Image (cartoon, helix red, strand yellow):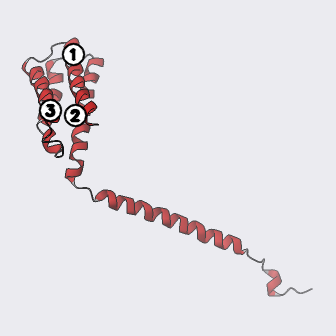
Amino acid sequence: MSTTPEQARPKSSAFSRYFFVFLIGLVLGAIAVVMLLRTLDGRKTWQDRWHEATMHVMNAHTNTLKEKVTQNRCGATDILPSLRTLRELTNDLEPAFPDLRDDERFTKHASAMRATLDGALAAPPINCEGVTAVAAKIGETCKGCHQDFR
């Protein structure tokens, strides 16, 4: 009994070939979408991200103050670097938010934040209760601005 070459080889399914091509197209499409989204996101300039970065760094330093309290490291040498950095960042609030620069409420909130930090730097807290009070004042000042402009 002899077999012909057509009978010896199993017939491949067209479905498996089409499915394989579909999977390759799906993967390449997903890669193309990710590349397109990254390109569009990359079009943002540093000025578009300045306000986000300012808020993230301010949040990080405020959280650092709270962490110092939980670690019971409330000495002036532990607290002052974060307070100084926060104070320097408040100088960038108006430039970081150019759309709000001329808004009287925004400038009032920015000035209040600077005044709070100036007071904290003029009389630095010497214990954890003082640091907690300063962090609460900073948080209230932030909250007031965020309620008006978020």
**Residue 82 screen position, x and y as percent:** 18, 28
Q: Position of residue 30 (x, y in %)?
A: 48, 62
Q: Secondary structure at mark 2?
A: helix
Residue depicted at x 13% and y 27%: 112
State which quadrant residue 13 falls in: bottom right
Between disc 3 and disc 2, the foreground one is: 3
For label 3, the SS is helix
Q: Is residue 53 above or below residue 36?
A: above
Find the distance from the CA under tag 1 to the CA under tag 2. Answer: 17 Å
State the image quarter where residue 15 is shown. bottom right
Which labelled disc corresponds to residue 110?
3
- What is the distance, in whole Å, between disc 3 and disc 2 at their CAs? 13 Å
Amino acid type at mark 2: Met
Helix, strand or loop for disc 1: helix
Q: Quadrant of the C terminus?
A: top left
Circle 1 residues within 10 Å: few <14, some 14–19, many ≥20? few
Mark 2 highlights which residue?
A: 58
Q: Amino acid at mark 1?
A: Ala
Which residue of the protein is positioned furthest toward the left in this rendering?
122
Which residue matches tag 1? 133
Answer with mark 3 or mark 2, whichever residue precedes in sequence: 2
Residue toward you, 47 or 32: 47
Residue shown at 78%/80% (left/top)? Answer: 9
Q: Which residue is painted at 24% across and 38% down in the image?
A: 55
Mark 3 packing: few (<14 Cα in 10 Å), some, or many (20+)? many
Residue 52 pos. (x, y %): 25, 43
- Give the tally of numbered discs: 3
Identify residue type, mark 3.
Ala
